Amino acid sequence: MKRIVVMISGSGSNLQTIIDRIHHSDVDAQIVAVIANKADAYGLVRAADASIEAICIPSSDFAHDRVAYDQQLIQAIDQLAPDLIVLAGYMRILTDEFVHKYLGKLINIHPSLLPKYRGLNTHQRAIDNADTDHGVSIHFVTPELDGGPVIVQAKVPIFSDDSKDDLAERVQVQEHQIYPLVVKWFVEERLVMQDGYALMDNNQLGSQGFAADE
Ligand code: GAR
């Protein structure tokens, strides 16, 4: 059975959907640990409630030393021997060393229709630009921030009276649908990263991932 490590910084609602889908036997995998860079990340409680090892490696001790911090992460992760590392609201930039080490088995969820709005504050930026739609992307992680090949996107409308919280809530409904699905594809070995592209069932996905086939 494939071994998954989930990395978080906060609430862990995406983590929860993956836990739930595994418990319902929709995804044949085991979450061997949840790692948070913040001690108060609620996802650690969700992990413990599900009898999953919950590890906190506080990044506040390494505010200015990403390399040393990521080396600690690597040490912890290598002991867990994961097949897949799922970034689920992990809000710290990873070093190139870390990314290269796990290239092809590292995926991230980002709340925008990439390549739009890399980085932070994506919901407010979409509203400020008077966009009419917004969404979420799941992608393989490469050293370029939020720049790795997209696996799938989900789109939502933006309404004129939306606050950023309204929009975030609408996007999260979609996040909870698509992230467990991508994890399922990966553990079933249908999804791989090769030569900088995401491949699904041996077919190269386009720049919008699966959404391009809608
Ligand atoms: C999610 O909305 C995810 O898209 C976002 O953090 C949230 C975590 O929610 N990720 C990023 O912004 C990554 N740059 P959760 O802790 O409830 O799963």
Image (tube, grey):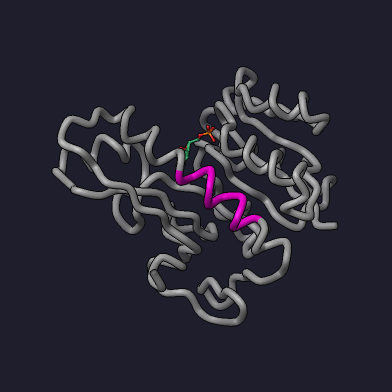
**Residue 178 sits inside the magenta stretch:** yes
Which quadrant holds the N terminus? bottom right
Residue 77 image-quadrant placement: top right
Quarter of the image containing the C terminus?
bottom left
Magenta segment, which residues?
174-183
Would residue 175 be found to the left or right of residue 26 on screen?
left
Q: Specify whether residue 159 is in view.
A: yes
Please state the horizontal and vertical placement of residue 28, each as a whole percent of the image. Answer: 78, 55
Picture quadrant of residue 79 = top right
Judge from the rendering whether residue 120 lies leftward or rightward of residue 22; answer left or right. left
Give the x, y percent position of residue 164.
Answer: 29, 30
Look at the picture and state if 193 lies above or below 147.
below
Q: Whole-percent x and y of residue 72?
A: 71, 38
Looking at the image, which residue is at 25% across and 49% down? 133
- Which secondary structure dominates the residues rendered in magenta? helix
Asked whether residue 70 appears in the rendered view, the answer is no
Residue at 77%, 25% (x, y): give it: 48
Picture layout, residue 140 above or below residue 31: below
Residue 112 coordinates in the image, percent (x, y) = 35, 48
